[in-house]
Image: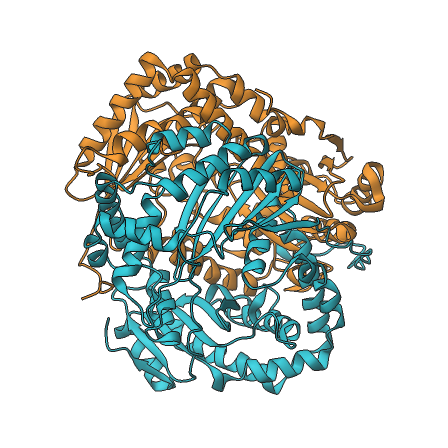
Chain colours: A orange, B cyan
Amino acid sequence: MSVIADKSALELHRATLANGLRVLVVPDPATPVVGVSVHVDVGFRSEPEGRTGFAHLFEHLMFQGSESLEKLEHFRQVQSAGGIFNGSTHQDYTDYFQVLPGAALERALFLESDRLRAPKLTVENLRNQVDVVKEEIRLNVHNRPYGGFPWILLPPVLYDTFPNAHNGYGDFSELEQASLDDAAAFFDTFYAPGNALVTVHGDLSEHGVDGTLALVERHFGDIPARPVPQRPSFAEPAPGAERRQTVADAHAPLPALALGYRVPDPAAEPDAYLAHAMLATVLADGEASRLQRRLVHGGADGAGLVTDVSASNGLMGGPFDARDPDTFTITAVHPAEVSADRVTAAVDEELDRLAEQGPGTEELERQTARWVAALHREDDRVMYRMLGLGARELLYGRAELAVELPGRLAALTGADVAAAAARLRSAGRAVLLVEPAAEPSGDGDA
Amino acid sequence: MSAARTHRSAEEIGRTERGPRPLPALGRTREVPLPDVLTETLPNGLTVLAARRPGVPLVETVLRIPAASPEPVADAARTAGTEVLAETILTGTAGRDRIGIDDALASVGGELGVAVDPEYLQAGGSALATGLPTVLDVLADVLTAATHSDVEVARERSRLAERIAVARAQPRTVAREALMRRRFGDHPIVSEMPTAEAVAAVTPGRVRELHADLVVPDGASLVLVGDIDPEAAIAEVARRLGGWTGDHPARWLSAPPVPQAGDLELVHRPGSVQSQLRLTAPGLDRTDERYTAFQLANLVFGGYFSSRWMENIREDKGYTYGAHSGQEFVPGGAVLGLDADVASDVTAAALLETRYELGRMVAVPPTEQEVTSARRYAIGSLLISLDSQSALAGTLSALHAAGLDVDWLRDRPRRLEAVTVDEVAAAATALFAPTRFTGVVVGDADVVGPPLAALGGVVRGGGR
């Protein structure tokens, strides 16, 4: 196909400062905006036992001021420079980012460096942000149907060890017990310059690549080096059999289920891993996909088995967003009259069929074209392209993965996808069932 | 301290020998790079807007058909019928079944979605730019020859009923419906989501009738943005969609009534652990001469993170994850809306602070520093927000529907620069006065009701 690797022209410039900080500069003269991100090599898999949710809580604290910037000043300075900002916590990394007009590049570097050097950690801010995080959790989990489904609910069924199984948003009681000293220890351990990566992508303004590298050196270079923590392996054996768990959901009107499987190590077997991403697409992306046809479209009476179905390789984002072990999920919401076993049996049959015959050549070509277009669409925003480059550089040392993704997906064969389906069928898995625990809510039209 | 220490204290971490550093200056912000937009109205009445925005080899497509109800009041049956129409339009035509439609789109990396609201039917999608002819072919096919077969209508009806149940379990949906009723009474604009009962009563025949009534080209617009040649793209549209006809022009929604100031309505949602605060007041249309000043006043109040309301109820008091104020445009004008989700036990406190901040917009108007920050944010975020094909296409489509074009957008930074602090203060006084607002609070009334009643200005809803 002729649609592949248009972005191979992206130039990737790398440097490492004397304090160990890694730097990635990727110019794009076609845009008037620039993105600056800091990826830190710590996610919720690394947080201490008894402190669930701490990595995410700490992400909030990093916005609360630093030596040169009073509380609220970080937000104000980004926004009054015309920029937007955010941060997010994943399994294996935490990112901080801003996108601004190119003219504000140096200001962005200043703001990011100041908090990486000397964040202002105070009890008052810690208590305030514990409250804010609790509201975030109420909003996204406790007060809505299917809150935390499946990313919080599925891992404890599929995994046994604390790093892989626990709730990355955190338990309220543990969040409330977090102390300022916990925060200081977390910062000194994980936010060492040698444990972080700065990415600059977009309009480098008059600075050019060399000028940008010099600016990064000027602002980040005098952060003293600290020891970089030894990252433990989070490996654990795949489940040998099916594991099942049921949870009650007070707000959900319909039952739902999630299937969780283990996937190949994305670093050691990138193409086998990617075959699972393609399998997810073949299963559930688009009206013509296998599970849409089988589970949603239904028979001659028009009755389908499920209301909605989706599949994805990776618990929180697209492909290559976490290190090993990572998770393949299939989720569905279904009417109460349809048993979960009917749904899982139909999924199993479709997986068996794919394992035996693989997808058709044209089917694979169509899904590849869709993947490639979707990746381009994501790349059409400086923010997402930057975050994709930075995450792959941090996790795998290969920002190129983001650029190569369309080509690698297009090179996959039907046999690769068949092998992925067979692999899912031959190993154990997690089955999570969400059951409505209603009291029919007072929200009806009665 | 003992030698066993493995890390510095929080205080040590927050200090360096060199001390605080000065903020570097900003350079000069570039102009918003907007392409020329070629516009042409075809003989059938469809207006096509096309712009070249390379960067990624894609084309973005937005079709917008005014599709309002001709009735003066909300009509549950019509809302349900148009929703089923939107859900079944991609499920088959005279020449293709739903798989055939999806396969054709997928072969050019395409996605297409159809949605309907009280004002418009919209079909939007993207595909590899080389696939534009295929996308237009599919679009023409579904617009002119969708069959809405009995089986597909039956299937989508039952699926819709389930999806509606899921949506209505979301507190934000409950709040949105209550707010729309509070604002606009029974004007058709309130009918954003059908009831399951009305959906169940929709017949295939009625869907086909509605298709003939709604899906007409005269008054519709099609925006194409991407790695395309605008002139060739418009010719392609004329070739493939020129045969689309209708026997009447598209239907525009009438202007809803202006929201009347008054008490907030408390809506009971048993077992809620949070409450949805939703306040509203009349806003300003883009063509109002105070619009730009109002936009800056809104940013200062609650339109971005560094706003008074957000800094108060999130960063100072921890009552909420987010508070946001902004406008929605409606026929004939606009409405200002304030939203925040807050814990049940601080609901009354959060409402008190919200009223306080509204009052402060009048009594302590935006300062020069606040206006400067809002102004720079408005200009910079405009630059960022238009930096993708999909965002540009969506913006052009919305502006065109409002009778504005790309020059209006091009001139935005200049207008933002020109607004004075006094004008922003005048807009703040006129538009954020607490006495202009009404709204709803959705929450567990057994928990939040007594303190809200004591605070005043909140009445218990009559149940829904």
Q: Quadrant of residue A225?
A: top right
Residue A295 position (above or below residue B327): above
User: What residue occupies the far left of the structure in this picture?
Assistant: A337
The residue located at (21%, 39%) in the rendering is: B151
Direction from residue B324 to residue A242 in the image, left or right: left
Q: Position of residue A286 (x, y in %)?
A: 39, 34
Q: Toward the viewer: A181 or A19?
A: A19
Q: Position of residue A130 (x, y in %)?
A: 48, 59
The residue located at (54%, 38%) in the rendering is: B239
Q: Toward the viewer: B41 or B37?
A: B41
Q: Quadrant of residue B424?
A: bottom right
The residue located at (46%, 25%) in the rendering is: A366
Q: How many marks?
A: 0
Q: Position of residue B183 (x, y in %)?
A: 39, 75
Q: Position of residue B93 (x, y in %)?
A: 34, 36
Quadrant in which the C terminus of chain A is drawn: bottom left
Direction from residue A201 to residue B164 in the image, left or right: left
Q: Toward the viewer: A356 or A400?
A: A356
Q: Toward the viewer: B142 or B282?
A: B142
**Residue A56, can we see it?**
yes
Residue A230 position (above or below residue B65): above
The residue located at (50%, 24%) in the rendering is: A266
Quadrant in which the N terminus of chain A is drawn: top right
**Residue B7, can we see it?**
no
Q: Quadrant of residue A7?
A: top right
